[in-house]
Amino acid sequence: MNAQKSPVHPNGMRTEEVGALKTNEVAQNDSAQPQPLRYAVDEARAILRMSRAQLYNRIAEGSIRAHKDGARTYVSYQELRRYVVACEERAARVCSHRR
């Protein structure tokens, strides 16, 4: 079998992963468990499929906004969505310039 891989976005996510994050809110509303409002760094980096160092670099450069609660760093669900959409828009602009 020759499975074709979907395009990869600048953040390293495949198209279906980006779509899953965008539609996750709808799917979560159908389930019994509420959507978490914020994620710890390790949870956020797993969702974005990037290393811990990459996530902290994005936070330091201002691409991803994080907040502290005591000694812990969190990223909100809305911020994860905003970042993924921004990456998609940036990738679309790059692709349209190449044509």
Image: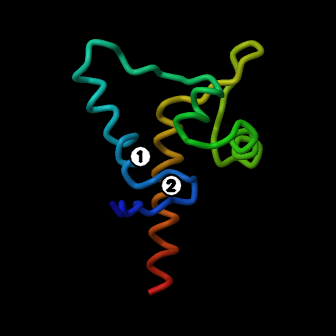
Q: Position of residue 55 (x, y in %)?
A: 68, 40
Residue where numbered disc 2 is placed? 86
2 vs 1, front mark: 1
The amino acid pointed to by label 1 is Glu
Question: Looking at the image, which residue is at 27% across and 32% down?
Answer: 26
Question: Looking at the image, which residue is at 51% across and 54% down?
Answer: 86
If the image is split into quadrants, where does the N terminus sit? bottom left
Q: Position of residue 76 (x, y in %)?
A: 54, 29
If the image is split into quadrants, where does the C terminus sit? bottom left
Q: Position of residue 85 (x, y in %)?
A: 45, 51
The amino acid pointed to by label 2 is Ala
Answer above or below: position of 97 versus 68. Answer: below
Residue where numbered disc 1 is placed? 17
Near-viewer residue (5 or 91): 5
Going by the image, does 16 lie left or right of 94? left
Near-viewer residue (5 or 78): 5
Near-viewer residue (76 or 13): 13
Question: Looking at the image, which residue is at 58% across and 32% down?
Answer: 44
Secondary structure under tag 1 reads helix
Secondary structure under tag 2 reads helix
